């Protein structure tokens, strides 16, 4: 272990008392004695600063297989459905938007209903997002200034999912919704990102958070063999610890469990915890996405949907999703 790396306090409660939990390669996971949060301590080099995502990560995030899958109509369908249910229109900021696929699909499905903007620390995926017509703001979200209303049409702002009382362009809080799709698990200090999200949201604005579920069937079956226990993931949330993280700025409007990938469970079981190369991750995403689009697989898809729904109801699906309202 690199002893020069700074020790992390608990990202949820700030506590300094933690017990060793798991070790996998260079990754050291601990459990907070105060709130039960499981997190990497210390944070592997390059992950906490985000430097990784501006360099080594690009071969994955910009690989043709990953881009093709991300831009497939089926890729974000669960997120889009949930988002639409709670936010039928308005100004939307996707934090950690990568190549911009979620916003692209949002705009494509419901043209004119949303004013979209993405942000990320990684430059090349944002170049791609822009090439697909997704407007972006570059840089570290914590240091960005969104004080000016963004994309407000000349006729005045469309009324969004935030408070109906908000009628005019207002300084400092231009967004009706902020989304973090599979982002908070990567961050050294996720609490700062939620505080910033609250700052840029209109009164009653919504925040959508999706993270891997530490209580998922996959985690239960695979433990350290699960591919998502790896250096890029610094935080391992349960519904309880995620609620604790969100509590200072948000109230929970909805809690859902989503996604289930039996192929990953099978592959990781056989692989026994060895690292999955990025090219293989991208390839699996591509084949899974292709399978979802095959009409002759309809009966299998029905069984799969039932399994996902059952696991979701039991809190055992792969991801944990919160819909939050600004306090
Ligand atoms: Zn804690």
Image: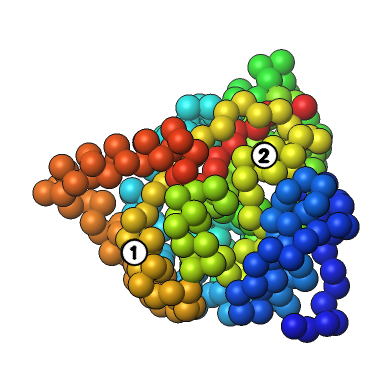
Q: In the figure, 239 relative to 49: above or below?
A: above
- The label number, if any, that marks residue 266 in the structure image: 1
* Neighbourhood count class around disc 2 (C-alpha, 10 Å): few under 14, some 14–19, many 20 upward: few
Q: Is residue 35 left or right of residue 160?
A: right
The residue shown at (61%, 79%) is 25
| Secondary structure at numbered mark 2 | helix
Which of the image's four quarters has the C terminus? Answer: top right
Q: Is residue 314 left or right of residue 250?
A: left
Q: Write down the quadrant of residue 254 in the picture.
A: top right
Q: In the figure, 282 relative to 88: above or below?
A: below
Which of the image's four quarters has the N terminus? Answer: bottom right
The residue shown at (16%, 49%) is 297
Q: Write down the quadrant of residue 201 in the picture.
A: top right
Q: Is residue 308 visible?
A: yes
Q: Is residue 186 left or right of residue 225?
A: right
Q: Position of residue 60 (x, y in %)?
A: 48, 73
- The scheme the figure's colours follow is rainbow
Q: Position of residue 125 (x, y in %)?
A: 54, 67
The residue shown at (29%, 37%) is 306
Q: In the figure, 240 relative to 11: above or below?
A: above
Q: CA distance from mark 2 to mark 1?
A: 28 Å
Instruction: Establish whether ligand 1 lies closer than 8 Å to the Cβ of label 2.
Output: no
Q: In the figure, 296 relative to 234: above or below?
A: above
| Secondary structure at numbered mark 1 | helix
Q: Is residue 188 visible?
A: no
Seen as rendered, the residue at the extreme top is 165
Q: Position of residue 290 (x, y in %)?
A: 25, 59
- Which sits earlier in the primary sequence, circle 2 or circle 1? 2
Determine which residue is flagged by label 2: 240
* Neighbourhood count class around disc 1 (C-alpha, 10 Å): few under 14, some 14–19, many 20 upward: few
């Amino acid at each position: 272990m690199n002893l020069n790396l700074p020790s992390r306090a608990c990202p949820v409660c700030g506590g300094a008392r933690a017990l060793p939990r798991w070790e996998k390669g260079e990754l050291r996971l601990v459990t907070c004695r105060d709130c039960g949060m499981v997190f990497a301590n210390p944070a592997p080099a390059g992950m906490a600063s985000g430097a990784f995502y501006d360099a080594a990560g690009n071969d994955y995030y910009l690989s043709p297989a990953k881009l093709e899958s991300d831009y497939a109509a089926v890729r974000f369908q669960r997120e889009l459905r949930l988002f639409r249910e709670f936010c039928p229109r308005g100004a939307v900021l996707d934090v950690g938007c990568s190549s911009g696929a979620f916003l692209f699909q949002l705009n494509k499905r419901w043209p004119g209903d949303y004013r979209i903007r993405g942000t990320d620390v990684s430059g090349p995926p944002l170049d791609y997002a822009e090439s697909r017509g997704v407007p972006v703001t570059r840089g570290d979200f914590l240091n960005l200034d969104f004080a000016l209303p963004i994309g407000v049409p000349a006729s005045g702002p469309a009324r969004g999912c935030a408070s109906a009382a908000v009628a005019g362009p207002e300084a400092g809080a231009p967004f009706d919704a902020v989304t973090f799709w599979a982002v908070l698990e990567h961050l050294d200090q996720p609490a700062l990102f939620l505080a910033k999200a609250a700052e840029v949201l209109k009164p009653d604005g919504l925040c959508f958070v999706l993270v891997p579920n530490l209580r998922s069937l996959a985690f239960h079956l695979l433990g350290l063999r699960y591919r998502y226990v790896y250096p890029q993931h610094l935080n391992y949330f349960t519904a309880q610890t995620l609620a604790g993280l969100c509590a200072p700025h948000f109230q929970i409007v909805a809690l859902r469990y989503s996604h289930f990938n039996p192929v990953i469970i099978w592959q990781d079981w056989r692989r026994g915890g060895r690292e999955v190369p990025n090219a293989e991750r991208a390839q699996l995403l591509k084949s899974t996405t292709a399978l979802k689009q095959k009409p002759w697989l309809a009966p299998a898809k029905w069984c799969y949907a039932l399994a996902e729904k059952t696991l979701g109801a039991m809190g055992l699906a792969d991801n944990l999703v919160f819909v939050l309202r600004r306090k």
